[in-house]
Amino acid sequence: MDIDAFVAAHRPAWDRLEDLVRRRRSLDGVEVDELVDLYQRVATHLSIVRSGAPYSPLVGHLSALVARARSAVTGAHTPAWREFVRFFTVSFPVVAYRARWWWAGAAAAFTLAAVVLGVWVARNPEVQAAIASPEEIKQLVEHDFANYYSENPAASFSGEVWVNNSWVSAQVIVSAIVLGLPIPYILWQNAANVGVSGGLMFAHGKGDIFFGLITPHGLLELTAVLLAAGAGMRLGWLAVAPGPRRRTDVLAEQGRAVMSVALGLVVVLLISGLIEGLVTPSPLPTWARIGIGVVAEVAFLAYVAYFGRRAAREGETGDIERAPDLAPTVG
């Protein structure tokens, strides 16, 4: 058997199969049919090589290619570690990246509401008097705000923060079921809490303490909540304007994709909780505590930008693997 001639004749088919297998999660119907056809043809090529040149290195190459193609065609389960890596390099970041404009819009609205409310509270003593008595405000700005971060053991406090923030994010994502309508109200509640606390602290000359305590963990924590809000509102909008595809298909696919955000944010909020429990109340200088928060925030944004953009270019949607709306068929 002339191996060189055989390779020259069939190399294009092998390369094409390699490409289809690599992009198997973003193939259209025609490409799925092509994948199945090439898998069968290359399996035949492997059988021919095994019969004519059983000791050729080509046997190993084609065996690996056929095995990968078989996995793509039949949907064979991949090892757990690959699922884990895929989730954090594709599924989670691509959903966050695709929702980036909704996420950015939520962040802008949240920041504007918190700043405007904070300035209003800080500049109007009558507003402060309506919020609480002078004694209660004094207790808050001089003791309670700072003590909140250090009155409990760091480990248990981190756990409480993690559970609370995960609950807020879960509420936001679940709101997508009703087209995301409750999400602006949930965000307003959180923006009001930040704005009122900040306004009271600044009105009494404690602005440096406010930012020194809220910034280290707050950047990543609020980013996580706003990401959940953006993904939830995007899903709600897709229910209104699904585009050329069937509404049920789009919602099924994107609904599963949003679950990737919920799962991914568990880890993000865990990191935020650890920062809040261990870094925020620590004796580190203010600049160091804020620096840790900024580094964590920049690292997360860079992670989403890098892996999310790459996955989006490859046609990934973040849909949970092996849960298709429609089973691909031949013909």
Image: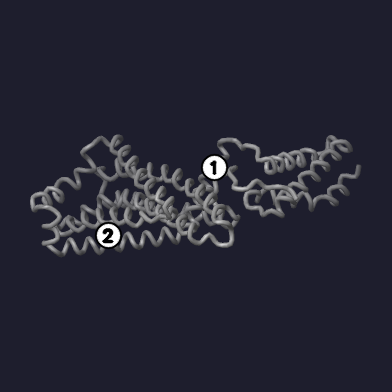
Q: Position of residue 136 (x, y in %)?
A: 11, 49
Q: Which residue is mark 2?
A: 114
**Residue 309 at x, y = what percent?**
53, 57
- Mark 1 and mark 2 lie on one chain; the one further toward the N terminus is 1
**Amino acid type indicated by mark 1:** Val
- Label 1 vs label 2, nearer the camera: 2
Q: Nearer the viewer, residue 228 or 173?
A: 173
Task: Indicate left or right for 30 with 173 as reference.
Answer: right
Kindly indicate the quadrant of the structure image that contains residue 264: top left
Dot 2 amino acid type:
Ala
**Which of the pair 159/50 is nearer the observer?**
159
Residue that appears at 14% across and 61% down: 127
Image disc number at residue 67:
none
- Secondary structure at numbered mark 1: helix
Q: Residue at x 81, y 45 (%)?
A: 41
> Which residue sits at x=66%, y=53%?
27
Residue position for label 1:
85
